């Protein structure tokens, strides 16, 4: 059973056009607070990033934002966080996020969210970590991604055991339950766990 005490959330700096995305981001933040866990995220006050942070803060959660200096200077940083860590660049941001979290959830987002999600999945695939990774498929947002992953498997580019590392649910409680119960498959690893990504 995974404790999920330091949950990293990747999501858009936009709110998107579907209000369900914002509502779910808030609900996820609230659920993190309700379970006395900490939220780790990109540090912004805008879009779904701001919504998940506000939801967590409203339930007394510790919220840690990690933001590159160049974004902080654009005044997008959330001013009311428990802690705001300012780093020099995007690579340092992702490294810090990886080091601080024990689990990962992706809400809807754009290129940045996809890049971060797939980097974490790739690291799990090659055995650099065994942290549970999940996505909230709000309003079918990730249906196309599910189809693409299955195409990768069917075309021989991805093993089924590795595809199963990505946990998918439509609602916050369902996803958290899947992540708590997740156990990495022994044959999913390519490398030993003592290899570090940085």
Image (tube, rainbow, N blue to C red):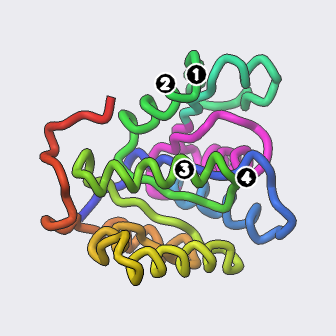
Front residue of 181 and 34: 181
The residue wearing badge 3 is 9
**SS for dot 3:** strand
Q: Is residue 144 above or below residue 35?
A: below
**Left or right: 33, with 76 as reference point:** left
**SS for dot 2:** helix
Please rate how many residues cluster around mark 3, counting C-alpha atoms within 10 Å: few if below 14, some from 14 to 19, many from 20: many
Q: CA distance from mark 4 to mark 3?
A: 10 Å
Q: Nearer the viewer, mark 2 or mark 4?
A: 2
Which region is colored magenta?
34-63
- In the rendered image, the quadrant that contains the N terminus is bottom left
The residue wearing badge 4 is 48
Residue sticking out furthest to the front: 155
**SS for dot 4:** helix
Q: Nearer the viewer, mark 4 or mark 1?
A: 1
Q: Nearer the viewer, mark 2 or mark 3?
A: 2
Q: Nearer the viewer, mark 1 or mark 3?
A: 1
């Amino acid at each position: 059973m995974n404790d999920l005490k330091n949950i990293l959330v990747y999501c858009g700096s936009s709110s998107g056009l579907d209000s369900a995305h914002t509502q779910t981001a808030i609900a996820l933040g609230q659920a993190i607070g309700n379970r006395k866990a900490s939220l780790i995220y990109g540090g912004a006050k805008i879009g779904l990033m701001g919504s998940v942070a506000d939801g967590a803060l409203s339930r007394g959660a510790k919220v840690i934002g990690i933001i590159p200096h160049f974004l902080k200077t654009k005044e997008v940083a959330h001013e009311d966080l428990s802690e705001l860590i300012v780093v020099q660049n995007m690579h340092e941001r992702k490294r810090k996020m990886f080091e601080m979290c024990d689990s990962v959830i992706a809400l809807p987002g754009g290129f940045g969210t996809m890049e971060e999600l797939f980097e974490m999945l790739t690291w799990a695939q090659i055995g650099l970590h065994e942290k549970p990774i999940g996505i909230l498929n709000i309003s079918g947002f990730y249906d196309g991604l599910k189809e693409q992953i299955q195409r990768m498997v069917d075309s021989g580019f991805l093993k089924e055991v590795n595809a199963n590392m990505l946990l998918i649910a439509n609602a916050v409680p369902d996803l958290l339950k899947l992540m708590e119960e997740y156990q990495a498959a022994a044959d999913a690893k390519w490398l030993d766990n003592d290899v570090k990504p940085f």
